[in-house]
Image (cartoon, rainbow, N blue to C red):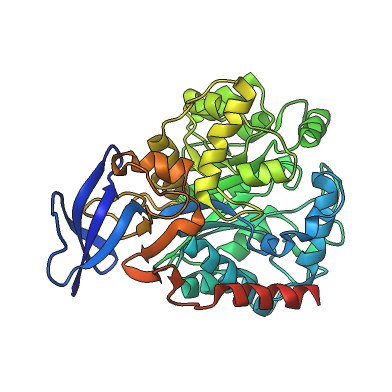
Amino acid sequence: MQVTTYWLEHAWLDAFVEPGVVVEVTGDRITALRKGVETPPPGATALRGLTLPGLANAHSHAFHRALRSTVQVGSGTFWTWREVMYGIADRLTPDSYHALARAVYAEMALAGITAVGEFHYLHHQPGGTPYADPNAMGEALIAAADEAGLRITLLDTAYLSSGFGKEPDRHQRRFSDGTADAWAQRVSLLKDRPGVRIGAAVHSVRAVPADQLATVARWASDRAAPLHVHLSEQTAENDACQAAHGCTPTQLLADSGVLGARTTGVHNTHLTDGDIGLLGGSGTGTCMCPTTERDLADGIGPAVALQKAGSPLSLGSDSHAVIDLFEEARAMELNERLRSRTRGHWTAAALLRAASADGHAALGWTDAGVLEPGAVADLVTITLDSVRTAGALPRLGAETAVFAATASDVTDVIAGGRVVVRDGRHALVGDVAKALSDAIAELHS
């Protein structure tokens, strides 16, 4: 098998930034790494700037990208935003969703993302009739990720009710399989394959009846698959759960066997101290999505307390108001500074790990997100001479990436050994802006 050699001008190797690093790639793996190589060896591709491991977007709703700017007119709440979102969801078909997701995933690749966790609940036709292929929408997303150069963990989502004891409304009928058993039967038709993991999700405690939560958890446990859940994003959900079950959503999930080391709670915004203890004590992860949480006026989740309690942190762009994991990492720290009026809750290296290794682990890719032999060959290079990063000390590369760089500073992306972005241009999709414009225009026409 052919060996491809890269010379990294500077490389972030978790604890330190090293100058002059040679990485050899065979197939989709890093097979050798050498430090202290001052100049590119003959035949090596030089990646100038700072090279990081691939970033993992642990929480995505690809179709929400069509809402960017559209939902910024006027005022409102999460719940009024949701009505606009449903309007886009109603228009999607497998073909239009493929076109949109391919463009959105290409935008992610340009931002240095090499793996995405797609929290997928658009399963059926409007009204709830299944497609001839009951997983046509999920397969469209899988194909879109491959064509854009990303690995995908399809977090197939159980969404069965519109609230505690309420049937799905007219928008939500296409989300629902009717029962958790029917959901499990359908999702079992989806299979892992190269570049693809099939995981599970509970949309929320309001969308999956309490007596059916264990079915979803069991499906994921039997397959050692990732299991994600929107958790306490809104205080209204907490209040409704308390009224229906006499406990918090976190307690309900714990009692139903949902929590655990392969589970990730998304947002985890409005938690009690007891909730934090349950999540941390069970090793349940936390995926923070700061740009969406601020865009939807959700609030600031207790990320510091969660991590101290034992909950690993990952990051997602969720609604794609912004697709920039450097901004997500930066925002998590800056949110805490605003709340606490103190600085330095995480090191830059810890924030980068949340965006890389820990994000990949939350999606079931435990061999990705690091630059070391045996790992998946994901290399992401950012320039150190843009107007944002110019003047930065190379040894402070982690600080530059998190607190100065943006997605626009990504120049090169190798994902699983495949060149996806070169010199700031997507090698597979080409004109990503046009692909986005065309796909979104079709949905708004």
Q: What is the quadrant of the N terminus in the image?
A: bottom left
Return the x and y of residue 101 as percentages of the image width and height: 60, 69
* Observer able to see residue 136: no
* Observer able to see residue 117: yes
Q: Quadrant of residue 64?
A: bottom right
Q: Residue at x 85, y 49 (%)?
A: 80
72 or 96: nearer the eye? 72
With 134 as the anchor, is 414 left or right in this view? left
Q: Quadrant of residue 28?
A: bottom left
Q: What is the quadrant of the C terminus in the image?
A: bottom right
344, above or below 168, in the image:
above
221 or 429: nearer the eye? 429
Return the x and y of residue 334 as percentages of the image width and height: 57, 33
Return the x and y of residue 298 as percentages of the image width and height: 73, 38
125 or 311: nearer the eye? 311
Q: Total of numbered circles in the picture?
A: 0
With 195 as the anchor, is 18 left or right in this view? left
Q: Residue at x 76, y 65 (%)?
A: 89
With 240 as the anchor, is 278 left or right in this view? left
189, above or below 253, in the image:
below
Return the x and y of residue 319 as percentages of the image width and height: 66, 54
213 or 65: nearer the eye? 65
Q: Residue at x 70, y 38 (%)?
A: 233
